[in-house]
């Protein structure tokens, strides 16, 4: 009797974590498209996808924030992780 309850709880927790991650990725995508395309076309970001790792994207985002990119310190880790996780040609950046 307890096993189905435990399995249901684990499934609900996994689904919540998945949905939270999807929401963060969607927010990061919106932030990237709004902040980066204010000064650059999206193709400039697109050409760097798959070439930069997490540390390189962190340095880039930090540098761009210093030049006025509208990315908050709170949102920065999600934006960096989002960019580092995109494969070359990924949408919406490479549309």
Image (cartoon, rainbow, N blue to C red):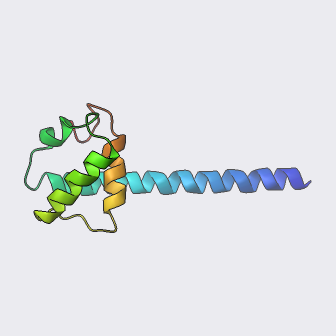
Query: Eyeballing the image, is 27 above or below 72?
Result: above
Horizontal side of 9 relative to 93 (left or right) equals right
Residue, far top: 89
Residue, far right: 1
Give percent across and percent down for residue 85.
37, 41
Horizontal side of 20 relative to 88 (left or right) equals right
- Nearer to the camera, 68 or 56: 56
Give percent across and percent down for residue 79.
31, 55
Q: Quadrant of the C terminus?
A: top left
Numbered marks: total:
0
Query: Eyeballing the image, is 8 above or below 90?
Result: below
Give percent across and percent down for residue 36.
16, 53
Residue 21, visible in the rendered structure: yes
- Nearer to the camera, 37 or 55: 55
Give percent across and percent down for residue 20.
50, 57
Query: Eyeballing the image, is 60 above or below 92?
Result: below
Q: Which residue occupies 13% across, 40% down? A: 44
Horizontal side of 55 relative to 3 (left or right) equals left
Q: Which residue occupies 19% across, 56% down? A: 34
Q: Which residue occupies 20% across, 51% down? A: 60
Residue, far left: 39
- Nearer to the camera, 47 or 19: 47
Q: Which residue occupies 41% across, 56% down? A: 24
Residue 95, visible in the rendered structure: no
């Amino acid at each position: 009797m307890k096993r189905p309850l435990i399995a249901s709880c684990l499934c609900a927790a996994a689904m919540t974590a998945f949905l939270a991650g999807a929401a963060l990725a969607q927010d990061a995508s919106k932030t990237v498209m709004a902040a980066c395309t204010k000064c650059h076309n999206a193709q400039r970001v697109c050409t760097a996808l798959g070439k930069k790792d997490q540390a390189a994207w962190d340095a880039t985002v930090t540098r761009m924030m210093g030049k006025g990119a509208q990315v908050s310190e709170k949102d920065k880790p999600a934006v960096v992780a989002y960019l580092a996780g995109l494969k070359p040609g990924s949408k919406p950046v490479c549309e």
